Amino acid sequence: MMDTKRRNFLKSAAMAAAGSMVAGNMSLPVVQADQGVSDLPDGDGLSWNKAPCRFCGTGCHVQVGVEDGRVVAIAGDKAADVNKGLLCVKGYHVGGILYGKDRLTQPLLRKDGRLTEIEWDEAIEIIAKRIFDSPETFAFYGSGQWTIPEGYAAQKFMKGGLSNNHIDPNARLCMASAVTGFLATYGVDEPAGCYQDLDECDVLILWGNNPAEMHPVLFSRVTDRRSRGETVRIIDIGTRRTRTTDAANDYLEMKPHGDVAISLGIMHLLIENDNYDKSFVEKHCNFRGDEADTPTLSGEPISEDEFRKRIAKYTPERVEELSGVPADEIRMLADLFADRDIRITSLWCMGMNQHTMGTAINSLVHGVHLLSGHFGRPGDAPTSLTGQPSACGTVREVGTLSHALPGGRVIANPEHREQCEGFWNVRDGSINEVPGYHTVEMFERFTKPTAEGGDITTMLVQVTNPGQTLPNLNALFNDKKGLEDKFLIVSDVYPTATTALADLILPAAMWVEKNGMFGNSERRTQQWFKMVDPPGEARDDCWMTIAIARKLFEMGHEGMKDKDGDFIFAVKDDDGQEIPIWEFDRYYDTNVDKHLFEEYRLFTRMKHKNLAPYEEYVKARGLRWPVVEQEDGSWRETRFRFSGFDDPFVEEGQEFDFYHSTSNDGRAQIWFHEYQPPPEVPDDEYPMWLCTGRVLEHWHTGTMTRRLAPLNRAMPTAYVEMHLEDAKAANIRQGEVVTIESRRGVCDLPVWIDGRGRPPRGTVFVPFFDESKLINNVTLEAYDPFSKQPDYKKCAVRVVKKSAAKVSS
């Protein structure tokens, strides 16, 4: 029983928060982790409920305190396995994201250059008419922030209803190379391990990422082990020193693109020294190389001897030349992987994914683990992390990519199209056999005049901000301005760089203002219920998609009818009567999320991504798929895929089984990819490398976090990190404003020397959260040939001194 003192503290904290938020202060009281879910009582007008955090892909759970229809307090959820009550600085303030002063609350139509308020019926009709008149030139751009039901509804609407595959998510910009790396190696997407690996590894290798800032709750699982007396060796492989470096035992500073050479060098030494795991490789692996003419994710089979020949050139000395990492450090890494008495976890995020060799480096790091046998035991795992709350669940599992279908299916496969048409009960041939445009191509065609090949004329954007996140914004977004025949529809919660060019703006509900489900980085599906109402006329994104579909149904669009003539999103009550969920005041007469999720579950079994019934997620803090029903009727999650001790789909008696092997023999693929240089390198005109990324205080474009006063005060502006010697050579002082110039655009920024991050000479770093300083006017849109993911981590720039005046903080 909670003592009176603590109860009074919680009550007073909630009341103080309510008062401060009415006054416009975005701070919420922080309830520390030791006051867990069992210590948070309902009553006195204050109620608590669970939800996953709205920010990154870690999937931390929070307890949300609601009073008088407002979120008034946030607590870390001790019952959640992911975070065990701990939150990062963003998570502790997540409740405040709902209450920025400039929330969008009414549909806005641009007339004669000015935004004018209109009613929802008019907005839906405008969208439906444009789609009805030209369905093939419509595109839907979504997000890893879509909930699973939102993404599934968009997927069904586009591919099953409109026969249009021009749907892609912003996860194309952040996770696509991880997807292709998993597929090329195992034949199925998403990690085989889970966060438990961080608790049990002896060595943690960080490949070009900064989890101390980007995934701090996960990183704390490792550093906290040290505080308990455990020994964990952290090796930071990066292009600049970060807060993660400060906690590392070893820092290996590499040149941009150096990770490819490093992974090849490790495998070379494992082969050369004859200390790879011969038994594991012989039983469970094949070798693969790039096809000569038209490379694919299947590659071409090569023998172990051929693999040895190809990798022989990547000696430690050659790798040092390519990567900048000393040869002895390459030997050190190889010696660690040769030791099977220790357990090694590799962790990566955007550094390996936002890469023109993204698929290659993902595949190679998987190959290092497979070749060395550091796979499939707790603590032995190659694991990618995601940056968005449902980049896995909604993009990768639901398949909201332009080439994909739900449950690991692909458009190019006729059998997969037929399966989906059957599940959706739509007419045969409804799904177009030609994949749609991926993100870069989609925006290229939207910002190009129709007469010049710009065959996307209407675009709906939900839950993302491409006007800030796309690379080379001048070409891929800003060129939309002045194109009278192009119509941009944006659903969002706040004004953004994207709404600045929108022709129609739709006010959206956010997070606990609606029901939802996310899928996090360790295959964990998480559910929550609506807790508060959205402001004004803001409405659910899922409802918007269904309302547009219904309007098209009423206009006679055949694709909005299933084989029985019913609306493709029909939900019926117990008496068989259709519930008009397209009318917003009737949308919550039923749980639309549950209906869509139960329909989606049918798709998840082909590639053993099995999900439990919706009600199981209501009771849990998420379940990691595959989730399988037991003899007693309970549902069991899976921590370690492909491992016989834990995976229910591994045949009994087998130690490992890669049951979706691309070679159809239960084996994983160890790849060889030849090192290739970056697509753009510094020269006399543009002599420096630019890398972009995030900071601890802000999440992605700052649309939410910059409206949280404590976070915005802590990090009020973007900046450029420079090395002291580079700054001296250019006569640049701390805080002075400089112009970062590339062949594509410019960005003005204050200089931060010897700050939080410390780049080497010849390199600058800029975070992208600040919409007043759009660094993506400068970045390069070159992308990986397999994943189509752009490279934000390396392009050539020059730094030009702009002013001696310091920027005020």
Image: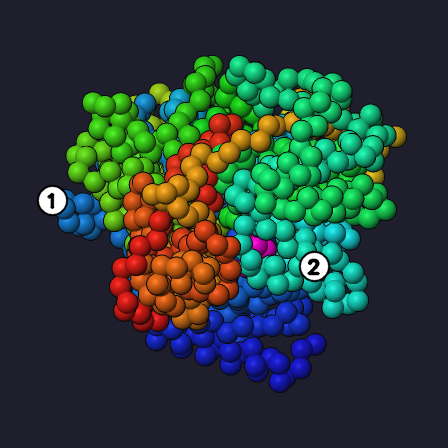
Q: Quadrant of residue 40?
A: bottom right
Residue 752 x, y percent position in the rendering: 42, 64
Which residue does the image show at 48% across and 54% down from the upper left?
761
Which residue does the image show at 62% across and 85% down from the upper left?
5
Q: Which colour scheme is used?
A: rainbow
Taking 73 as reference, is 224 left or right?
right
Given the current orientation, which residue lies at the most extreme bottom position?
5
Residue 136 x, y percent position in the rendering: 32, 23
Residue 709 x, y percent position in the rendering: 40, 70
Which residue does the image show at 73% across and 25% down from the upper left?
308
Q: Distance between the residues labelled 2 and 1?
A: 60 Å
Secondary structure beneath dot 1 equals loop
Binning the other alpha carbons within 10 Å of mark 1 as few (below 14), some (14 to 19) or many (20 upward) gives few
Q: Quadrant of residue 234?
A: bottom right
Which residue position is annotated with label 2? 249
Residue nearest the viewer, comparing 478 with 782 = 782
Confirm or deny contact between disc 2 and disc 1 (CB under 8 A).
Answer: no
Amino acid, disc 2: Asn
Which residue position is annotated with label 1? 112
Amino acid, disc 1: Asp
Taking 256 as reference, is 113 left or right?
left
- In the rendered view of the protein, which quadrant contains the C terminus? bottom left
Residue 159 x, y percent position in the rendering: 43, 26
- Dominant secondary structure of the residues highlighted in magenta in the image: helix
